[in-house]
Image: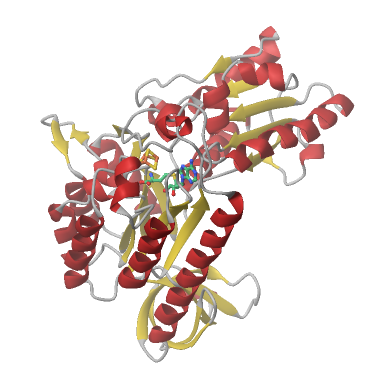
Amino acid sequence: MIENKKYFIKTQGCQMNAYDSDKISELLAHHYNMTSTEDPVSADMLILNTCSIREKAQEKVFSELGRWKKIKESKPGTIIAVGGCVASQEGKNLKQRATCVDIIFGPQTLHRLPKMIDEVILKNMKPVDVSFPLIEKFDFLPQSTSSDVSAYVSIMEGCSKYCTFCVVPYTRGEEVSRSLDEILFEVSSLARNGVREIILLGQNVNAYKGIRNKDNRSISFSELIRYISRIDGIARIRHTTSHPIDFTDDLIEEYSNSKLCSNLHLPIQSGSDLILSKMKRKHTVLEYKNMITKVRKIRPDISITSDFIIGYPGESNTCFEETLDLIEQIGFDDGYSFIYSKRPGTPASSEPDDVTIAEKKKRLSLVQNLIRENSKKYLSKLVGTNQEVLIEGMSKTDSRNLYGRTLTNKTVSFRGDRSLIGQLVNISITKANRASLEGICEI
Ligand code: SAH
Ligand code: F3S
C-alpha cells in the first residue's frame, strides 16, 4: 500500500508544469496522505513531470530515468510515473525506451493519477493515459489550500495557435478555458486563505473564453480580470503568457484598472516580418510595436518582457539584426531567448535547419547581452524612487531581510519585520543589482 509513504517529484520546463506538479502533490496528500521528500532514494514513488519544448529538455528525461531504474532495482516496488509533454508525445513508446516506468500520464490526465496508482498496486497493471478529456481535470483536483502571498490560478489549458516550431498544441491539446464561476470560486477561497496576488496562468491567457454559468455567455479575458478585481483581499493581478494576436484593445484598456500589475510578458520570437510569417505568428512587427505604444500610454513605466527564438530556418543576418533593433527600440527589460530546436512532428521540422550552431550561439549571446544591458538600465532608473512593494516573505540569504515585488514585477529586498508579510508597503529604492533591487522600508 502507498498510504502515508513518500514521493519525490521532479519538474522540468514551464510554469504550467510547476503548477501541475503542485496539483499532483495536493492530489497525493489528499488521496493517500503521502508526503514529499527531496531524496529520490528514500521515496516509494518517483514522478517526473517532463518538458519537450526543446531537444535538450527531452534528452534529460531519459538520463533521469536511467538513474531511477537503478533506484528501483535496489528497491523493487518503487512506483515510477512519467507525466508532462514527453509522456504526452511518446505515449506507449516511452515504455519501450524505459521499461522501469509504471505509469504514463499527460498534462490533461494528471487528476486520474490515484486511479492509475491503484491499478499498479492492486492489478499489477502499467497504465498509460495521455488523452485530452476536455477540461474535466479541475473537477477532480482537491481545493487549493495555498496561503502564500501570491498564488497561480490556471484559467485555460492548451494552445490552438500552431506556431510552426512548437510542440505545445500536440502535447497539451487545443485551447480550453475553465468556467468563470469555477475560477472565481477558486480565487475567492484563496483570498480567504490570505492570498493577496493572483497570477492567471495559461499558454495563452488572453485567448480565454470561459462560460458564465447563469446565462452560458462566453466571457473574455478582460472581463475575467474585471470580475477578479472585485474580490475582496486580492490586491494584485498578474498573468502569463499572452499571444500578441489576442492582445486586443479591450485588454489594453484594462491597464487602467489599478489591480492589474505593470508587467507584460508578450512573446514576439523575432523582429523580422519574414521570420514571423514563416513561424505563422499571424502579426507584423509594426502591429506589435503599436500594441506596446498603446499600453505604454496607460502605464508609461510598464515592464515589457518577451521570448525570442534564435536561428529559425531561413534567419539571415539581416533578419537577425532586425531582432536586435527591435530589442533596442522596445527596450525589453528582460526576456528568455532560445536557440531554435527542431521538434519532430512540427511543420518547421521539414525545413532545413540552415543556421550553423556556431552562428546560433553567437547570435544568442548578442541577444542576451543586449537584454542584460536593457535590464540594467531599467533597474538603475528605479534607484531613488519610491515603489509600492507586496511583501512575500523572509529573504533566503539574510534572515534580517524581507523580500517582495514591485508592481513592475522586480524583486526588492530590505530590512523589516516578518509581521509585514502580505502587506503592501512603500519602499525607497537604494540600489540596483544585476537582476534585483535593494531598498529601505518607509514605515
Ligand atoms: N505560449 C507561449 C509560449 C510557449 S513555449 C507563447 O505565446 O508564445 C515558451 C517559449 O519557448 C516560446 O515562446 C518560444 O520562444 C520557445 N520555443 C518554443 N518552441 C521552441 C523550439 N522548437 N525551439 C526553440 N524555442 C522554442
Ligand atoms: Fe507554442 Fe505558439 Fe502556442 S509558441 S504554445 S504554439 S502560441
Nearest to the observer: residue 296 or residue 330: 330
Horizontal placement of 144 versus 246: left or right?
right
Residue 235 position within the rendered picture, expressed as x and y whole percent measured from the top left: 31, 64
Residue 177 position within the rendered picture, expressed as x and y whole percent measured from the top left: 29, 34
Q: How is the image coloured?
A: secondary structure
Q: Which residue does the image show at 55% across and 64% down from the upper left?
A: 365
Nearest to the observer: residue 217 or residue 204: 204
Residue 429 position within the rendered picture, expressed as x and y whole percent measured from the top left: 44, 87
Q: Is residue 184 above or below residue 70?
A: below
Q: Quadrant of residue 42?
A: top right
Residue 34 position within the rendered picture, expressed as x and y whole percent measured from the top left: 66, 34
Nearest to the observer: residue 348 or residue 301: 348
Q: Quadrant of residue 27?
A: top right
The reply to whether residue 181 is in sight is yes
Q: Which residue does the image show at 60% across and 22% down from the upper left?
A: 104
Which quarter of the image is occupied by the N terminus?
A: top right
Which quarter of the image is occupied by the C terminus?
A: bottom left
Q: Which residue does the image show at 73% across and 37% down from the upper left?
A: 64
Q: Which residue does the image show at 23% across and 62% down from the upper left?
A: 289
Q: Is residue 108 above or below residue 240?
A: above
The reply to whether residue 196 is in sight is no
